[in-house]
Amino acid sequence: MLGFELSEPATLDEAFDLLADGDPGVRPMGGGTALMLMMKAQIFKPERLVSLRNVGGCFDGLRIDADQSHIRIGGMTTFAEIERSPMVLQHLPAVVRTMKTLANIRVRHVASVGGNLAHADPHLDLPPVWMAHAASIRIVSKSGERVIPVEDLFAGYYETTLGDGELIGEVIVPVRPEWTSTYVKVTTRSAHDWPALGIAVSANLQGQRVNDLRLVLSAALDRPTRLDAAENELRGSDLSEAALKRAGEAAVAEADIHSDSRGSAAYKQHLLRVHLSRAMHSLAGA
Amino acid sequence: MTDARTIRFTLNGAPVSVSVMPHETLIEMLSLRLELKGARESCGQGLCGCCTVYVNGKSVSSCLYLAQLVDGAKVVTIEGINDGAELDPVQQAFIEVGAFQCGFCTPGFIMMARELLDVHPNPTEDEIRHYLIGNLCRCSAYPEIVEAVKLAARRRAAGTTPALAEELSA
């Protein structure tokens, strides 16, 4: 790695000042896992890294609102903290199950939820899971804050809609007792390879009937994406083979899937049809 | 601040202070400045586990960890897991079962296996294999490694170190 400046501000205001000059070589750092890999590969050559680990405030902590309506996960919360939280296991079991498939425990001891989202690599497993859970993020900046759905964060391959000086302070996940969720990481080489596609599914089911649902496809596209047409095929219908087949075809038609080293477009389209149907069945069986 | 900074932390129980550059990784500081060669950089991407150390009681890949970030922390390496008189039960089990050939990956496996036994004192084979998914042994001594972890778990549970032959036949 090449030399750079490393700052560890103790307050958010100080962090904003250190990040203020609009230079693309000046970047905030969460756990730093993805940044370290990019720096070691010399894809990213920072001039200054601003670690957010000491800024406190909403960046820290993992809690549920007093009325049990939302779970708030500070941007600097590590994956391992989420994975080991009994509260998260109780309300968001699919998140904990997904954690077990992410990299390895050493990485999960360090990687942060906010940094993971800001990285905006479309192959990451957690962003589609947050989207399926209808999660939002609180974005803080020197001039105030705003809350947006996670799906509005992603602008493209490694690109976000965050402006200069904006930071992801926390992830806000609604508690939805009527819903069940799952994430399917489809790998085509080794089990812990990056996914060829990721399918995050969340649904409000009554027996075999789908009252409402959210379907998210990741990895095969430039950003995690809601499958609106496929959702429409299933919303209000029963989980019949015919409905699932229509949903699978709708998903394939609406998703602009490209070929890459993890499989041809046709192969990934086939995987999408098969795994979307299986994911819905697994929810109904749960 | 692109210059070196002196950081202070606890290394294997003893206070140390070291002058390090912002872009230095923890593994570089440990092996080059502090002459601790047990953890070693192999893949450099957090995948293989050879550089595993504990920072504040948690395993990390020291190849992906900036050295300056351990300022004020407690760092433990493979050199610090026993008292110098007696081996850690996991070390002892690896030797008795022969859970290595070349030994390059062994410090990392031992560090992860110790942490596994803290989290799951009586792990199933699946739990062992899953916890060690981020550790690679290019000699492929995996069956013996799993066996050594099971042996260490039994020893820890019993609080004793009975003869190996007796235990393997149990």
Image (spheres, coloured by chain):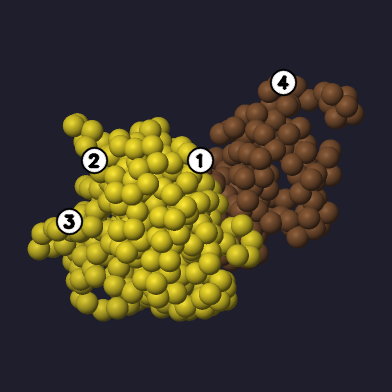
Chain colours: A yellow, B brown
Residue A53 in view: no
- The amino acid beneath tag 4 is Ala
How crowded pointer 3 is (Cα within 10 Å; few <14, some 14-19, many 20+) is rated as: some
Discs 2, 3 touching: Cβ within 8 Å: no
Q: Chain of mark 2?
A: A
Left or right of B61: which side holds A92? left
Discs 3, 1 touching: Cβ within 8 Å: no
Q: Secondary structure at mark 4?
A: helix
Q: Which residue is mark 1?
A: B57
Q: CA distance from mark 4 to mark 3?
A: 53 Å
Please tell me if label 1 and label 4 are on a single chain.
yes
Q: Secondary structure at mark 2?
A: strand
How crowded pointer 1 is (Cα within 10 Å; few <14, some 14-19, many 20+) is rated as: few
B10, A209: nearer the viewer:
A209
Q: Which residue is mark 3?
A: A147
Q: Chain of mark 3?
A: A
Can you tell which mark lies on residue B105? Answer: none
Name which residue lies at 83% across and 54% down. Answer: B101
Can you tell which mark lies on residue B158? Answer: 4
Discs 4, 2 touching: Cβ within 8 Å: no
A165, A156: nearer the viewer:
A156
B49, A241: nearer the viewer:
A241
- The amino acid beneath tag 2 is His
Q: Chain of mark 4?
A: B
Q: CA distance from mark 3 to mark 1?
A: 35 Å
Residue A151 location, quadrant: bottom left
Please tell me if label 4 and label 2 are on a single chain.
no
Q: Secondary structure at mark 1?
A: loop
Q: CA distance from mark 2 to mark 1?
A: 31 Å
Q: Position of residue A91 (x, y in %)?
A: 35, 36
- The amino acid beneath tag 1 is Gly
